[in-house]
Amino acid sequence: MKIIFGFLSLYLIMPYLGLFTFSEHEKNLFGDIDNYFIVSYTIHLLIIFMLVLIILYKTNLKKDYISQKFISNKKINSIFNKSILFLIIALFFQLFVYGGINILLGKIGRGDFRTTLGFLGFFYNFFTMFLPAGIIVISSIYYKISNRQKLFKRKLFIIYFLGLLIGVLTGFKFTALLILSAGLVQVDRFIKMKYLITLGIFFLFLMSFSAYYFMRLEPEVALQYIFARATSVALEGTVGIWNLFPDGGTDSWMALMYAFGNKISSLLTGYNTDSIDFLKINITRLIGYLTYPKANEALSGAFNLTVTNFGEGVYYFGKYYYFIFSIITGLILGITIKIYYKTIDVNSIIKNTMLTIYMMLVVFPWLMGGVIGNLFGIPTFIYMLLLYLSLKLINSNIIIRKLN
């Protein structure tokens, strides 16, 4: 419970803190922050938290998996072995099929790398985020229902290590956090608060090292960058929308087409993905194009600005009716969390794994920087379908006995 509400609060509150750290330079680029902005953002958060608590009223938030004697150690051991094998394959795809090793070696920047992936780039998120996170989650569930012998604990550690390694090697600090967050939800009751704080410090160090290595920032600058990226920088796109689209965006409904993905949206509208007209479909690139001195990169897709859930609400409904989107957000969050707890059952392991991934990799990140189209979009559907098929194979009766 503490992990779910911890991450929910993290995604909602960190950008909000940016209200009080927004620099003069940022104000010159994106516009000022007035009192009405602060009040509106505060009301937005209060509506969301209130609706989530109302929906979860009387829900058993302590519900969890327990040890099950009827599931054999042989089956659980085989699931761990298949999980490790799948992660090794995913790591191979990441480094050598997609050429991610070039990011590691500093031969290409992260933004440029995204634009060179081509057609296979569609599956990059699956191999580097959805699959590792899904494997970590299902392995954690099976560890909880096992007798938790040392062999299983050791293999679970290897699974977490490989999953995090895949996330870190993408060069995107947030990816590793997403993968870890999904696993932490399942091991919530095993983590005491002092260990959680230690883990938070370790992950802060990991992200700082990632910024130091991949972005060539000095250690002290890297730490400042991490904090700024989660607060004021995460708020930049939202401030830009507040000042540029006070009554909502023109043809804002077109942003819902992002659910189809770039290629299909381009076919449906006739707009090239690197055209100015196409930016109406991707508001994170649109606001980057309009406010930041990287217009060409915004058009190519190599650069975008974070737009928080509040900013998206302003874009759809304007700054006087944003609360409609706040209500929609609160309902989505509350219902998602409630369904997650309902699927905690030994006969619904894959279903609960899928709900965990959807909640932690799709719904929660949407709050800090995403678009509502991601929640029901074709790319998300395909990623989840591929994950389901992978989990079915891992959970099958195909036995791999030795992988020590």
Image: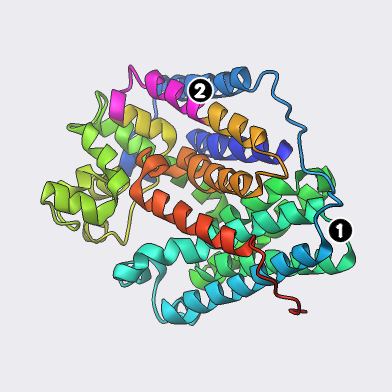
| Residue sitting at the far left | 270
Q: Nearer the viewer, residue 314 or 139?
A: 139
Q: Quadrant of residue 133?
A: bottom right
Q: Is residue 203 magenta?
A: no
On-image quarter of the C terminus: bottom right
17 over 301 or under it: above or below? above
Q: Residue at x 46, y 28 (%)?
A: 329
Q: Is residue 325 magenta?
A: yes
189 over 38 or under it: above or below? below
Q: Residue at x 29, y 70 (%)?
A: 118
Stretch of the chain drawn in magenta: 316-332
Viewer-side label of 1, 2 = 1
Q: Quadrant of residue 373?
A: top left
Q: Earlier in the sequence, mark 1 or mark 2?
A: 2
Any part of residue 14 in sight: yes
Instruction: Find residue 344 and report its horizontal and vertical position in percent.
Output: 69, 39
Instruction: Find residue 347 and report its horizontal and vertical position in percent.
Output: 69, 44
Identify the amino acid type marked 1: Arg
Q: Residue at x 67, y 61 (%)?
A: 205
From the viewer's perspective, is 322 left or right of 52?
Answer: left
Per the image, label 1 sits on a secondary structure element best described as loop
Any part of residue 176 in sight: no
From the viewer's perspective, is 14 left or right of 97?
Answer: right
Residue marked by disc 2: 42
From the viewer's perspective, is 53 left or right of 68?
Answer: left
From the viewer's perspective, is 183 left or right of 92?
Answer: right
Residue marked by disc 1: 148
Q: Nearer the viewer, residue 26 or 203?
A: 203
Q: Residue at x 66, y 59 (%)?
A: 136
Identify the amino acid type marked 2: Thr
Instruction: Find residue 193 and report its horizontal and vertical position in percent.
Output: 81, 43
How many C-alpha atoms fall within 10 Å of the one at disc 1: few (<14), some, or many (≥20)? some
